[in-house]
Image (spheres, rainbow, N blue to C red):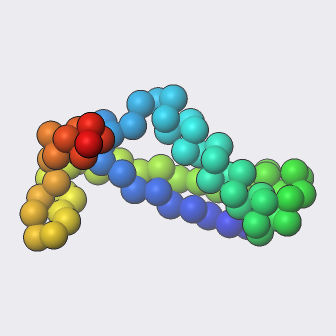
Amino acid sequence: MPFVNVKTIKGALTDEEKKQVVERITDVMVDIEGRGNANFRQFVWVLLEEEQAPNWGIGGQQVSMEALESARSQ
């Protein structure tokens, strides 16, 4: 039974995007670990955790929503 933990910045994803993340990760696990057997879907766990932006850092800098939005628009 696969368990996939996805961590992201709080507010980075809409509810619809979260739904898509869960569905697509599940699809990948069914395709790979379940070898395409649709019955395997019921055994795939996906946990999406959100953390406040200041709790994240990359390249020695705290992440901000502004930086995330800027990266998306490039």
Identify the residue at image location x=40%, y=56%.
7
Q: Position of residue 46 (x, y in %)?
A: 59, 53
Q: How many labels does the image show?
A: 0
The picture places residue 30, in percent across and down from the top left corner, at 77, 58
Q: Name the side, left or right, on which 69 lies relative to 4.
A: left
* Residue 58 vertical position relative to residue 37 in the rendered view, above or below: below
- Asked whether, in this view, residue 17 is left or right of residue 26, the answer is left
Q: Which of 14 and 5 is in front in this view?
A: 14
Q: In this view, does 65 lie above or below 29?
A: above
Query: Which part of the image, by quadrant, shows the C terminus?
Result: top left
Q: Quadrant of the image for the N terminus?
A: bottom right
> Which residue sits at x=62%, y=64%?
3
Left/right placement of residue 5 relative to residue 43 reads left
Residue nearest the viewer, comparing 70 with 26: 70
Extreme residue toward the left, this view: 61
Residue depicted at x 68% and y 66%: 2
Residue 35 falls in which quadrant of the image?
bottom right
Which of the 4 quarters of the picture holds residue 62? bottom left
Q: Nearer the viewer, residue 59 or 37?
A: 59
Q: Which residue is drawn at 62% across and 53% down?
A: 25
In the rendered image, residue 28, in percent from the top left (x then y), is placed at 69, 57
Q: Is residue 38 visible?
A: yes
> Which quadrant of the figure has residue 60?
bottom left
Can residue 65 be seen from the camera position used here?
A: no
Q: Position of residue 11 (x, y in %)?
A: 30, 36
